[in-house]
Image (cartoon, rainbow, N blue to C red):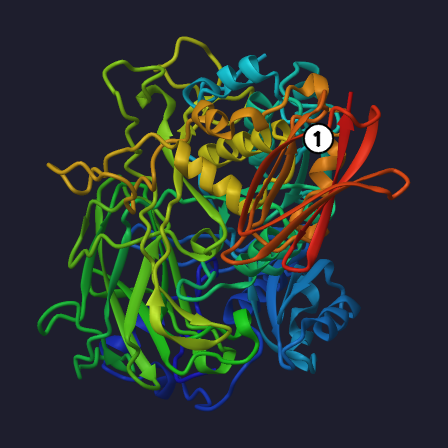
Amino acid sequence: MKKHYLKQLLLGSLALALVSETQILAQGKSPERGLGVAKNKKSKVSTDLVKVAEDQAARAQRSAPVISQVEGISVTPDVQIFDGYVVIEATSVEGNASGLLQELQAQGLKNGASYGVMVSGLFPIAKLEGLEAVSSLRFVRPAYTPARNIGAVTSQGDVSLKSDLVRAKYNVSGVGVKVGILSDSYNNRNGAAAGVASGDLPANVQVLEDLPSGGSDEGRGMAELVHDVAPGANLAFNTAFLGQASFAQGIIRLEEAGCRMIVDDVVYFAEPFFEDGVIAQAAEEVVDRGSSYFSSAGNQGQQSYQAPYANSGLTVPGIEGAAHAFGPNDVRQSITIPPRGSLTISLQWTDPFFSANGVAGAKTDMDMYLFLNGTLVRSSAADNIANGDPVEIIGVTSNSTQPLTVELVIVKYAGPDPKLLKYINYGSTPRFVEYDTQSSTIAGHANAEKVIAVGASAYFNTPQFNPNTPRPIINGFSSLGGTPIYFEDGVELKKPQVYEKPEVTGPDGANTTFFGADTPIDADVFPNFFGTSAAAPHVAAVGALMLGGVVGNLPPIQIKKRLIDSALDMDNPLTPGVFDTGFDLKTGYGFVQADVAFEELGNRVRSESLTAVAAADAKVGSTRAGLPAGTEASVYPNPSTGQVTFNVLAEENQPISVVVSDLSGREVFRTKGTQRLSLTQNLGALPKGMYITKFEVAGRSSSQKLVIQ
């Protein structure tokens, strides 16, 4: 541990009694010196987990655990506990988590998963004390409850996307495509059977892993939205709430279960802002295998502070470290929390995450302190250099019916001055933020290059429902893009990379049978599902229609391109007086229009009445089968009466060949080209039956079946 009495009080911990602590600070003493804590003692186990164990022991002795509350402020209780188990995230010493996973499982870890150097799962609270002796453990903390980006039923989003028109015109429904969903839970509320009975869910939803208990079943709400847009698609679900490593492995499991469209609506507060963490890495891994990945952009609007670290040279009485100057000679930032509101701050700085790369970790140790009326009410002071992750998290909730103004202090405890500080507030929208920079809030895996981040526009603010809005209007809470990436595999980039985020916008506020609350805006009594959590599954379902309704291979990069090309341009309300033509960091490229996407696909669209080889084509023609990533290859119409078009789009200067053979392997047609090949050939003289079309690009190949009728 480091030189603080409060040490590592992170989000979700039950804080120690603050009375003696406040008295010590009032005297201007170091908390550590006042209590005689050993200066150089370091612990593998976060103070939060120690407190969880202490609270359980207190309950066993029938004494109440201490919960801090100072003048209406209390700790936000976001440690996840299930029947004597707590959800943990642990990093390994050796850089490979397989050995750590085995050691933790021997100690009682349940539902364990590993990815990179991280392990997560359910660990018995009674055995937390023994974690200090686990040889392969570097550090362990709770996996705090992540944010869900929320705010006989058919989603109105289906109409606003015009996917209803696509199904009617082209006779497509997503048959042959499987959509994977990640959220908190699927059937904790025992309503799945009723959803199947009412026709709002398919009967064969594959649940790979559900949350043990206590979930809202938001994943089932997302499934209802997907089923409305792509009713022929199969669905699968995996919880994303059992830690980052479990989330990452859930992504892989869904892809391995055959999901070609995967969507989530979850963000962890400890996901790296400036580097791809394990969840982002898993998402990009499945994209490389041939599955498209969609994530809700987030509901944090512009609730972010971002600025270069300004070393004031000043210290705050009782706190060790050089305070960050928010303004000239001002090291305290005032934030006004609304009545009964919350403040959840994840602070990060430009250092690499050991938990993300397994090689390089934090070089600087930063701490946060929160004051109310001069009294210290909350702190986050992990030893970042020891645990390797440059993140500090504070969470408080107001119990007052009046706004409360708190003051935030950020200090550098040790190490070099970082280039940049950034925090995102995942709590309520503040009434006031001093020195507010209104910065980007799309971070974590939604900010990964190959992930499609989806913003939200209420369906009733789209042209299909409101003739006074010729262009959809973005929801104010929809998160802002622009978070820079500084590191790759722990190595600092020569120049920070900023991706175009969000890519597109989709609808929210639509009906489900159970999730959310009914709004008076519509005339029915069904609950309305708001937030980017609702927008992302809508857009993923359009991707399922495209993949299931098109002849040949349509890799993730082409799905993404066609969704972007279809989008109805929207205005960024953060730049009043100027229409932001094309991409902007609030709305992306605009609101997805399924009918435009299908028009652009032209005669490659096939009716599902002719899909005798559709499922086989989708799997055989995938990137995972052998073609280079991003290659598009198709043969259509299929089945054909003779006139056949071969279409291949590859990277620059890559050689292409197309060979058609009968089932005996005898070659009946061959052609070749470079980078782009589009050729219509009359094969009507061939005997009717099935043939194999082999596409070869840059020495890699894939095959599709071709039927001549």
Residue 486 or residue 477, whichever sits in front: 486
In the picture, residue 458 is in which quadrant?
A: top left
Res 127 → quadrant: bottom right
The image position of residue 339, as x and y in percent, is 27, 41
Q: Is residue 528 above or below residue 388?
A: above
- Residue 74 place in picture, x, y as percent: 37, 53
Residue 491: percent from left, percent from top: 45, 78
Quadrant of the frame with the C terminus: top right
Q: Is residue 375 left or right of residue 221?
A: left
From this viewpoint, is residue 591 visible? yes
Q: Residues within 10 Å of mark 1 (few under 14, many from 20)?
A: many
Q: Is residue 140 above or below residue 221?
A: below
List the residue tagged with mark 1. Answer: 176
Q: Residue 142 placed where, x, y %?
A: 55, 62
Drawn side of residue 510 relative to residue 89, left or right: left
State whether residue 48 is above or below residue 600: below
